[in-house]
Amino acid sequence: MNQDSAVLNFDTVQTNDDAAIAELHRLFDAQRAAYFANPEPTLEERLELIGRIPGMMVKNYDRIVAAFHADYGNHPALTTTLFDFLNVIERAQQAMENLAKWMQRDERPLPPELYGSSVAYIRHQPKGVIGNLSAWNFPFDISFGPLVDMLAAGNRVIIKPSEQVPACGELMREMIAETYAPEQVAVVTGGIGLASHFSTLRWDHLLYTGNTRIGREVALKAAENLVPVTLELGGKNPVIFTEDSVTPQNVANMLGVKVAKNGQICINADHAFVPRAQQDRFVQLAREHLDSLFEDYTTDPDVCNVINKRQWTRLQAMISELRERAPQSLVEIGSPATTEGGCRMPFTIAVDPPKDSLVATTEVFGPILPLIPYGDIDEVIHAIQQGERPLGIYMYSEQPDLIEKVRCNTSSGGFVVNCCALHGAQGNLGFGGVGHSGHGRHHGIEGFKEFSNPRAYVELKDDAAIDPLLAPHREITGQFVQAMMG
């Protein structure tokens, strides 16, 4: 995910962040003390804490919509509702329905000839105090969604929202302060000084969502204290169309995901592989579909703004490079880019861009779609294998053999057939990356387990006969070894 953190004057941020860093340490110490006082909350305690989340969201719905609009300049209310409101409530409800089952001990068999009626099992123990460095594109979903998993696992949590969404961050701080005691859940707000310091604390677990460069820095700082880290990063998620699948319905489906939040989604379609013979048809279908939806893609109020000038400038650099090197590749749908009244730009298809161009080598994270023509599915598989492993691979096809071939010969955080990004929308389906797109999972039982310590237990009963295992290892041990070796 392209999350460029440096958006404020560093000197100003550092001065302001001294107080925020001190507050972070105060909250961290308070939560650690509270954890030791109650290291394993009951099912009822956890359900009560999670149960506060839906009411908190509903109570603040209008303020959430307004905060998004303030940070983006234009962010459609229904987009906010789908991704940063309903998603959070659904995850809370799903966790409450399943938590009793998740918390049950996981029985493991023991050899009865040695252990008799003894039992062995795994119980998932709270880790303690968890930090969450969340991202700007889904500030509530990426802050409060994992909070559900963390509370389900019995932890205490401190959230640091991205400084690129100050209105959302301040609202989250107020909402959490009104809903939870600070020793249970807290939000700290500040700039890059606070963000940089956050990962130096001795967390019991740390979640970071953002880009790979910052993710590497977070992981290195956390490693100094041997803090386990979940990284949700992103990458260049490919969409594959086969000969049979370049249809109006499929192109419309893919674009319906791609233009959500104006492409500013870490699991969104980054680029499309299209059979060379279908290239022109794909472009025509894309143009017709977008023209049917928007009078002017660039200015339509149903299209989210690019969040800020920094991200807009990054995207314009991709377009400017293509104008210089391969102007024939550009298909722009909408009026020219502008920053008047917000950062806006046309939807742009980059047809067969140079392989070393910015759009071909870096995550787009915006309304640009590189279109890569191919002749054989093996070319696509090879191209994916040569790149870093993405958060998602998406394939439109009605050919099961080809789908299975791509699935078996590639690796990614998720794999979706005949749509894009749906794996990240399921509250009961573990979500995360692999390799450079991250590691670890949250959502559902995978999230509960991610933020738990899977503690191993053995309870030895009186009918156990483990003498062969005990030192000194003499005749009875030799007999046992001989029997085990046949």
Image (cartoon, rainbow, N blue to C red):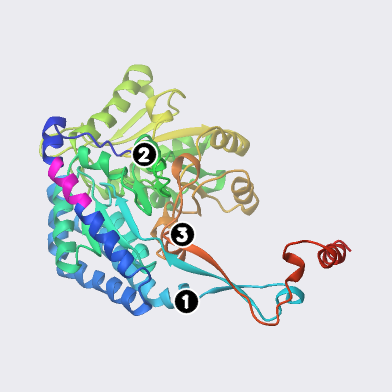
- Expressed as whole percent of the image width and height from the top left, the position of residue 99 reads 41, 74
Q: Earlier in the sequence, mark 2 or mark 1?
A: 1
The residue identified by callout 3 is 430
Say whether residue 80 is visible.
no
**Dot 2 amino acid type:** Lys
In screen coordinates, is 103 left or right of 214? right
In screen coordinates, is 59 left or right of 36? left
| Residue 395 belongs to magenta span | no
> How dense is the environment of label 3, judged by Cα within 10 Å: few (below 14), some, or many (20 and up)?
many
Q: What stretch is highlighted in magenta?
A: 18-25
Q: With respect to residue 207, does 449 lie above or below?
A: below
Determine the image quadrant of residue 310. top left
**Dot 1 amino acid type:** Lys
Q: With respect to residue 61, does 431 lie above or below?
A: above
| Of 451 and 353, the residue lying toward us | 451
| Of 461 and 6, the residue lying toward us | 461
Closest to the camera, between mark 3 and mark 1, is 1
**Dot 3 amino acid type:** Gly
The residue identified by callout 1 is 101
> How dense is the environment of label 2, judged by Cα within 10 Å: few (below 14), some, or many (20 and up)?
some
Q: Residue at x 86, y 61 (%)?
A: 485
- Expressed as whole percent of the image width and height from the top left, the position of residue 47 reads 33, 76
Say whether residue 20 is visible.
yes
**Element marked by disc 2:** helix
- Expressed as whole percent of the image width and height from the top left, the position of residue 284 reads 39, 39
The residue identified by callout 2 is 221
In screen coordinates, is 426 left or right of 191? right
**Element marked by disc 1:** helix
Q: Earlier in the sequence, mark 2 or mark 3?
A: 2
Q: Which residue is drawn at 40% across and 60% down?
A: 127
Query: In which quadrant of the rendered image does the N terminus lie?
Result: top left
Q: How far apart are marks 2 and 3 (CA)?
A: 26 Å
